[in-house]
Image (cartoon, helix red, strand yellow):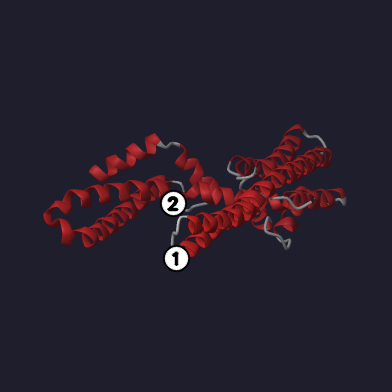
Amino acid sequence: MIVIDFVRIIIRANPQIRRDLRTAHIPKTTEQFVKRALITGVYGGAVFAILIFFALAKEMGIRVVPIMLVGFGAGFALIVAFSLQTPKGIIKRREKEINREVLFAGRYLLVKMESGSPLFNSLIDASKSNSIISKYFKEIVDEIDTGTPIEVALDNAREYNASEKFKKILWQILAALKTGTEVTNALRSTLKTIANEQLIEIKEYGKKLNSLMLFYMVLACIVPSLGVSLFIIIASFLNLAILPAHLFAALFGLFVIQLFFIIMIKASRPAVEM
């Protein structure tokens, strides 16, 4: 009963979980997902407490128990918080997948419909194409095959889609179907807007890359070389012994800086395929 109440408290405090689960396509109810996060948190907190016990029990004796309780609570809170954020990570990955090919997929639909293919047949062809985004079209087609009207299926796909760009394409198609206007004209205009947005993203990435390269040259090239040289000179004046551990520490610091810049460059790269 206490667990159920705790689950309800977490759900009320995080009402976006239900939507995130639907958008991330995680086949669990909100209650099941939160319960799983709590169970994982209990196991993680227990591991933290056990590690603290083996590390400090010999020196502290019975006094280690309060520290173990604090470790359990901290581990439990951290792991539960991390577990509740996993749908957002999946949504982010899905967004990058879709954005990478959204322009190609939109143009594919446009070519199919301009050649005289009905919208539903164009969606089926897109779901069978050799691309990552085809599985997202297949979700729409599968929903239509189960008896859902095409307008409702497109609206559901738009509502619970991770990509704002793909939402624009689906919204234009849906609006054209509801108003009875030509789908191809609305889709062509939307694709042109998305292409312009991607060009802007590429230009912004180029500017950001120039700044990152400047900091990289300073922190990863100039500072280590000059720093080590100055350290050796100062150590020779002060008769300080330079141990291999000092050089290994400098090498490790340089590795961390390199890794940091690689992650930053990779994270800031736009998901674009013109």
Residue 18 image point, x, y percent: 46, 42
Question: Tag count in the figure?
Answer: 2
Reading the image, the residue beneath label 2 is: 28
Outermost bottom residue: 244
**For the residue labelled by badge 2, is the local secondary structure a helix, a strand or a loop?**
loop
Residue 213: mark in rendering: none
Q: Amino acid at mark 2?
A: Lys
Residue 115 image point, x, y percent: 87, 52
Q: Amino acid at mark 1?
A: Leu
Determine whether, in the image, residue 117 is placed left or right of residue 55: right
Residue 243: mark in rendering: 1
Outermost top residue: 179
Callout 2 touching callout 1 (CB < 8 Å): no
Residue 160 is drawn in which quadrant?
top right
Between label 2 and label 1, give the one nearer the viewer.
Answer: 1
Nearest the viewer among 132 and 159 is: 132
Residue name at image x 54 percent, y 57 percent: 233
Residue 108 image point, x, y percent: 80, 53
Determine whether, in the image, residue 173 is placed left or right of residue 182: left
Residue name at image x 61 percent, y 46 percent: 148
Determine whether, in the image, residue 223 is placed left or right of residue 28: right
**For the residue labelled by badge 1, is the local secondary structure a helix, a strand or a loop?**
loop
